[in-house]
Image: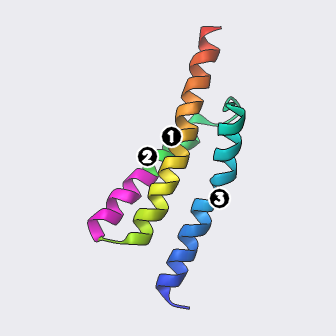
C-alpha cells in the first residue's frame, strides 16, 4: 500500500464519519444537543486544510476537507439557528 493510498483512505474515512451526524441533523432539524465549539473548530479547521490543499495542489486533501467543511458547516449553521431560537424563548 502506498502512502497516497493510505492518505486517500484516511481522507475517505474521516470525511465519511460526519455523514451520519449531518444526515441526522438535517433530517431532524435539531442541533440543540451538539457542541457549537466542536463544530466551529471543525468547520474552521477543515476550511484551513482545504486552503492548504489548494496551496500544495493536493487533490485528496482538497476533496476530503471540502466535503467535510460543507458537512460540518451545515451542522454548525443549524446549531447557530437552534441556539438563536433558544435564546428568544
Q: How is the image coloured?
A: rainbow
The percent coordinates of residue 59 (x first, y second) are 39, 70
The percent coordinates of residue 26 (x first, y second) are 65, 38
Residue numbers of the magenta segment: 46-56
Disc 2 to disc 3, C-alpha distance? 17 Å
**Badge number at residue 44:** 2
Please give the name of the residue rendered at 51% of the width and 75% of the height, measured from the top-left corner. 8
Please give the name of the residue rendered at 56% of the width and 18% of the height, measured from the top-left corner. 84
Q: Earlier in the sequence, mark 2 or mark 3?
A: 3
- Callout 2: few (<14), some (14-19), or many (20+) C-alpha neighbours within 10 Å? some
Please give the name of the residue rendered at 67% of the width and 38% of the height, measured from the top-left corner. 25
Q: How many numbered circles are shown?
A: 3
9 to 3, vertically: above or below: above
Left or right: where does residue 54 sit relative to residue 59?
left
Left or right: where does residue 57 sit relative to residue 88?
left
Disc 3 to disc 1, C-alpha distance? 17 Å
Residue position for label 1: 40
User: What secondary structure is the magenta-colored segment mainly?
Assistant: helix
Q: Secondary structure at mark 3?
A: loop
Look at the numbered discs 1 and 2 and tell me whether their residues touch, using CB distance below 8 Å. yes
Q: Nearer the viewer, mark 3 or mark 1?
A: 3
- Callout 3: few (<14), some (14-19), or many (20+) C-alpha neighbours within 10 Å? few
Residue position for label 3: 17
Look at the numbered discs 3 and 1 and tell me whether their residues touch, using CB distance below 8 Å. no
Looking at the rendering, in which quadrant would you find the N terminus?
bottom right
- Work out which residue is located at the far bottom of the displayed protein and give it: 1
Look at the numbered discs 2 and 3 and tell me whether their residues touch, using CB distance below 8 Å. no
Looking at the rendering, in which quadrant would you find the C terminus?
top right
Amino acid at each position: 500500500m502506498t502512502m497516497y493510498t493510505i492518505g486517500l483512505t484516511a481522507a475517505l474515512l474521516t470525511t465519511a464519519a460526519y455523514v451520519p451526524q449531518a444526515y441526522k441533523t438535517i433530517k431532524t432539524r435539531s442541533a440543540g444537543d451538539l457542541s457549537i465549539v466542536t463544530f466551529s473548530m471543525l468547520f474552521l479547521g477543515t476550511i484551513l486544510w482545504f486552503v492548504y490543499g489548494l496551496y500544495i495542489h493536493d487533490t485528496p486533501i482538497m476533496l476530503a476537507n471540502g466535503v467535510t467543511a460543507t458537512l460540518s458547516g451545515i451542522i454548525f449553521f443549524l446549531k447557530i439557528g437552534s441556539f438563536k431560537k433558544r435564546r428568544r424563548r
